[in-house]
Amino acid sequence: FTGTPVGNDASEGRYLLDVIKGEAALQLNDEGFVSSFHARGSADFPQEVPVKGIPDGVLHDGMLEELVKKHSLHGEALKRYILKEVEFQTIPRLLRLPEEKRTGRLANYCNMHVHYGAYHSLNRTALLHDVKSHSPKMYVVAKSITKRDEKCVVMIAREMGFKVMLEVLRIAGKRAGFKVATLDELGDFNDARKNLRGKRFRVLVAESGQAGEGVQFRHVR
């Protein structure tokens, strides 16, 4: 039992203690049955500290500037983004869409130079041949992961390029000597005995629509 033994009345603590001791030990004193820590600053409690670069405290909108890492578009990705932005501002059919929907569709082109549904054939070949130009953000993510040897999780929506991110990281992994898992290998990724430090799978790419509440990523640094 952990936590506060008294919820509403002091007698509840006595009742809980009797349950823990059992009938055979009711005549014995209470020593050894309950440990009470009155000072939260005690060294007996684990200390939580934020990851380097992450602000401490409750997350709120005002922390976005500190949490978000910005990266500029360039190359083919920037060209395609500008062309699409012009289309959303000039084509009547697109202008009739709600502004929020137009912004959401345009956001797809922040991650790669084509719509995620067009990632095949020549578009796929061009992107994988020059990731830095066709998908600058994914290039930076892969580069950052390659420089470190800690387990990590990358979460990305299908519409924002899940398949592309997975393929880019697997190619980077072959060059740098690490393997990339998906939710299909979640059990192997979380295995404390075989994959505590990422020896089997150092990176897991999760499609955010599938990695909902209850999904655990263990030993991620």
Image: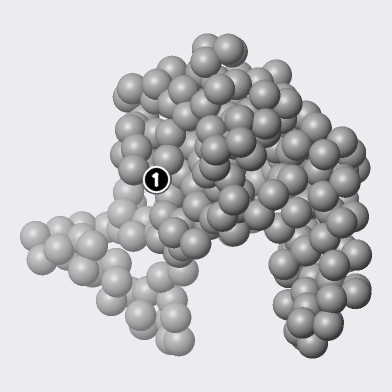
Query: Residue at left 78%, top 74%?
Result: 102
Query: Residue 156 at what x, y percent from top left?
Result: 59, 51
Does residue 218 show up? no
The structure's colour scheme is: one colour
Residue beneath disc 1: 183
**Left or right: where 22 falls relative to 140:** left
Could you tell me which residue is drawn at 83 percent across and 82 percent down? Answer: 92
Left or right: 17, with 183 as reference point: left
Q: Is residue 39 above or below residue 10?
A: above
Instruction: Depth check: give the residue in front, 191 or 177.
Output: 177
Q: Looking at numbered disc 1 in the image, what kind of residue is underneath it?
A: Leu
Characterize the local packing of mark 1: few (<14), some (14-19) or many (20 or more) Cα atoms within 10 angstroms: some
Residue 21 lies, with reference to residue 164, above or below; the image says: below
Q: Nearer the viewer, residue 1 or 190?
A: 190
Side of 119 where 6 appears, left or right: left
| Residue at image location 23% in from the left, 62% down from the top | 20
Badge 1 element: helix
Image quadrant holding the C terminus, namely top right
| Numbered disc total | 1
**Residue 16 at x, y = what percent?**
29, 71
Q: Nearer the viewer, residue 209 or 26?
A: 209
Which quadrant is the N terminus positioned in? Answer: bottom left
What x and y, as percent, mark residue 148? 66, 21
Among the 4 quarters of the image, the one containing residue 3: bottom left
Whether residue 56 is situated above or below residue 203 in the rendered picture = below
Residue 186 can be seen, yes or no: yes
Q: Position of residue 2 (x, y in %)?
A: 40, 59
Of 137 and 66, the residue lying toward us: 137
Instruction: Identify the residue shown where x is 59% and y is 13%.
Output: 176
Q: In which quarter of the view is residue 29 placed?
A: bottom left
